[in-house]
Image: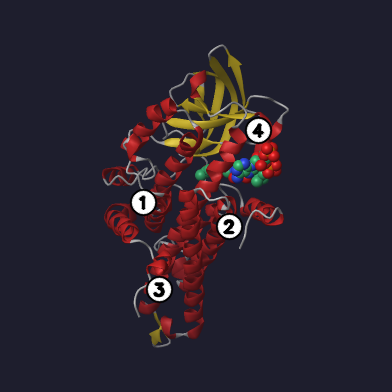
Amino acid sequence: MAANPQFDVYRLPEEHQAIRDATREVCDAEVAPRAAETDANAAFPQKSYAALRAADLHAPHIEEKYQGAGIDALGTAIVIEEVARACASSSLIPAVNKLGTMPLILAASEELKAKYLPQVASGEAMFSYCLSEPEAGSDVAGMTTKAVRDGDTYVLNGAKRWITNAGESEFYTVFASTEPGSGSKGISAFVVEKSDSGVSFGAPEHKLGIKGSPTREVFFDDVRIPADRLIGAENEGFKIAMRTLDHTRVTIAAQAVGIAQGALDYAAGYVQERQQFGKSVSQFQGVQFMLADAAMKLAAARQMTYVAAAKSEREDDDLTFYGASAKCFASDVAMEVTTDAVQLLGGYGYTTDYPVERMMRDAKITQIYEGTNQVQRIVIARQVLNGLVKL
Ligand code: CAA
């Protein structure tokens, strides 16, 4: 049959396959061998960061105009997926660099972009995202961190919690209330630097997984910043935060797909070697059905993630639906696949001598951060009920 070029939409372009191959090569050699140690020591994976930086995979999404690698949303999702397959903690380096800088990319002045993006592109600095607070997690509009205009400066006071890579990152997108009492209509976004006077960090949280990625509180005590560090217009911050998450929920979906793939690869190899009742356990139908379910769901999650990534690149109107759906679906699949991978390894799977228990612990966070999967379902349902998505 003659090839119909129209059907190329259902095949990964060669360029993206090359991105996958290049990332896998770096991760197999430099990232995967350190994943267990990173988890055990709960230490930021400096050597993995150096390897990703050397290969220009630490912030692949930044445009060439700002000295970045200029990899599109699909390619960036593939990079994050491949790093997560090796080490979920390390995958938060490209993922959070995208999350932290996305508000600038979407809404900042050219001056702000030109000042900060090249530093992230070169790997000199990382960029984190400060949205959640102790009393404002799902309910973003309930935040109490304040920014008060004073001449040509803003003064910030408050606390942000659950901030990924806090302390390691040099720069932070910080959302703060500029019009208290106005809810989502009174929030603005700012760039804050780690070295700004009055910025401090809490102790690292002791977490179930992603232990190599520090999660800390960030405190703002009379932090005075120049007014030109405002991202976009005043009081537009809530929409900037939500638009950012539309794009970056796709990257969490990719992370989930990668974690699940790592677990499935390991379990599929293990069951062929493990002998019980005089034969390889892969010959038992019960085991085969578990592998089949895992592979089938993983393939579906990957396809949905790539479609969402393409929509992110094009900024399609239905990105909100697809970003939330991909994140929710892929993270639920990752939890299921990694839990089943532990089951397939039996008692061995439950020990730290094998990687699947780490993958199961790492998968859990993908159902929680960048909006719990309950919030994703709220977002999805609103899109359906308001007729904003045509399926
Ligand atoms: N794009 C543009 N505008 C949007 C939007 C979007 N995706 N979503 C909402 N808006 C607009 C609405 O249109 C509305 O505008 P108007 O006032 O002009 O009508 C305004 O924003 C308010 O919207 P809602 O009424 O929907 O707001 P809400 O208070 O009901 O909240 C929510 C909605 C979906 C629950 C939202 O608060 C939410 O997503 N919560 C979860 C927060 C989250 O994901 N946190 C993750 C933190 S980051 C993280 O986890 C990072 C990490 O560690 C790696």
Picture disc at residue 95: none
Q: What residue is pinned by disc 1?
A: 37
Picture disc at residue 268: 3
Q: What residue is pinned by disc 2?
A: 325
- Between circles 2 and 3, the one closer to the viewer is 2
Quick check: is the Cβ at mark 4 less than 8 Å away from ligand 1?
A: no
Distance CA(mark 4)–CA(mark 3)? 45 Å
Label 1 packing within 10 angstroms: few (<14), some (14-19), many (20+)? few
Quadrant hosting ligand 1: top right
Whole-percent x, y for residue 132 in the image = 59, 38
- Between circles 2 and 1, the one closer to the viewer is 2
- The residue under the point 48% across, 26% down is 192
Label 2 packing within 10 angstroms: few (<14), some (14-19), many (20+)? many
Q: What residue is pinned by disc 4?
A: 143
Q: Is residue 185 above or below residue 27?
A: above
Q: Nearest the camera: 258 or 77?
A: 77
Q: Is residue 330 above or below residue 125?
A: below
- The residue under the point 39% across, 42% down is 44
Q: Earlier in the sequence, mark 2 or mark 3?
A: 3
Q: Earlier in the sequence, mark 2 or mark 4?
A: 4
> As shown in the figure, which amino acid type bears the numbered disc 4?
Met
- Between circles 1 and 3, the one closer to the viewer is 3
Determine the residue located farthest toward the right in the rendered image.
181
